[in-house]
Image: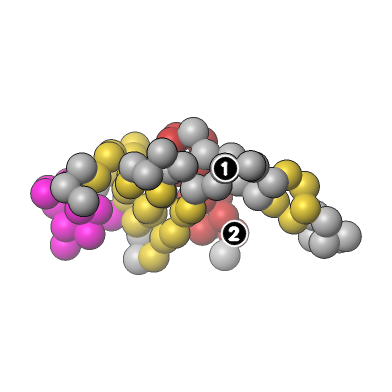
Amino acid sequence: MEYFAQQAVSMAAAVGLSLMGLNAATGEVVSMPKRRGAIAGAGGHMLALKVDGTLWSSGSNDLGQIGDGTTDYRESPVQITWL
């Protein structure tokens, strides 16, 4: 879980998203952006949906799961334009 959280924070920073966080001790919301995007990940790759509706992806891509038409590993997020 810690690895996924680190990857989610990295993805959010790379595509300019603010993340909502919770204080684990109190359960209080630390920050709540007025406009939200979304981040998801599985199997070594991440997806980010920005508030402007664009989709970005990074990570493992050996089966084309990034969605950019290649099988190249993507360290930095790339925009998925075919949707």
The residue under the point 57% across, 65% down is: 1
Q: Is residue 9 left or right of residue 43?
A: right
Label 2 secondary element: helix
Residue 28 lies, in percent from the top left, at: 83, 56
Which residue is denoted by mark 1 in the rendering?
A: 35
Label 1 secondary element: loop
Q: Is residue 17 within the magenta segment?
A: no
Which residue is denoted by mark 2 in the rendering?
A: 2
Q: 64 or 32, which lies in front?
A: 32
Amino acid type of the residue that numbered disc 2 sits on in the rendered structure: Glu
Task: State the separation of the CA atoms marked 1 and 2.
Answer: 25 Å
Above or below, 39 against 10 in this view is below
Residue range (magenta): 60-72
Above or below, 14 against 82 in this view is above
Amino acid type of the residue that numbered disc 1 sits on in the rendered structure: Arg
Residue 15 lies, in percent from the top left, at: 43, 36
Above or below, 43 against 22 in this view is below
The residue under the point 16% across, 62% down is: 63
Give the prevailing secondary structure in the magenta stretch.
loop
Q: Quadrant of residue 78?
A: top left
